[in-house]
Image (cartoon, rainbow, N blue to C red):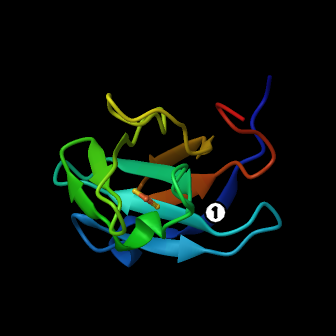
């Protein structure tokens, strides 16, 4: 499947160890940047009760939801056990500091 990449700004638009929210037809998407400057894109809605993941704490390759502290894997959107659930993940890539997102497909529904 080919990706439909859309440029959504530069990596420097995303605070390190933080996030930036993009509105899309698919709903709000949170772009996260971790301490290694790796970028991840997740639907900005916790699979538990819809908490804003963009307000969560980024550590390594995980984010902790600000509402009830579920921890999700940024790469897969999966909740870390014992919690169960998954946030939708969008393909994202960084090239020459530019961040590209594919809104049309998701890694997981
Ligand atoms: S809404 Fe995220 S942990 Fe409850």
Image quadrant occupied by the C terminus = top right
Residue occupying image coordinates x 49% and y 67% = 51
Left or right: 62 in relation to 93: left
Residue occupying image coordinates x 64% and y 31% = 107
Query: Which residue is outermost to the top?
Result: 1
- Image x and y of residue 54, in percent: 42, 69
- Image x and y of residue 60, in percent: 18, 44
Q: Nearer the viewer, residue 47 or 56?
A: 47
- Quadrant location of residue 81? top left
Q: Nearer the viewer, residue 70 or 75?
A: 70
Left or right: 80 in relation to 49: left
Neighbour tally class for label 1: few under 14, some 14-19, many 20 plus, Cα within 10 Å: some
Q: Is residue 5 above or below residue 83?
A: below
Q: Which residue is mark 1?
A: 7
- Quadrant location of residue 100? bottom right
Residue occupying image coordinates x 24% and y 57% = 58
Q: Nearer the viewer, residue 93 or 31?
A: 31
Secondary element at tag 1: strand
Q: Nearer the viewer, residue 54 or 8?
A: 54
- Quadrant location of residue 86? top right
The answer to whether residue 80 is visible is: yes
Image quadrant occupied by the N terminus = top right
- Image x and y of residue 53, in percent: 44, 63
């Amino acid at each position: 499947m080919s990706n439909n990449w859309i440029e959504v700004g530069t990596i420097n638009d995303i605070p390190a160890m933080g996030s930036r929210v993009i509105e899309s037809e698919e709903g709000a998407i949170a772009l996260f940047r971790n301490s290694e400057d790796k970028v991840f894109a997740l639907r900005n809605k916790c699979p538990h009760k819809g908490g804003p993941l963009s307000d969560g704490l980024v550590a390594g390759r995980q984010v902790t939801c600000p509402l009830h502290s579920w921890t999700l894997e940024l790469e897969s959107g999966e909740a870390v056990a014992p919690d169960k659930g998954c946030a939708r993940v969008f393909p994202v890539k960084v090239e020459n500091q530019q961040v590209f997102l594919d809104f049309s497909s998701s890694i997981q529904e």
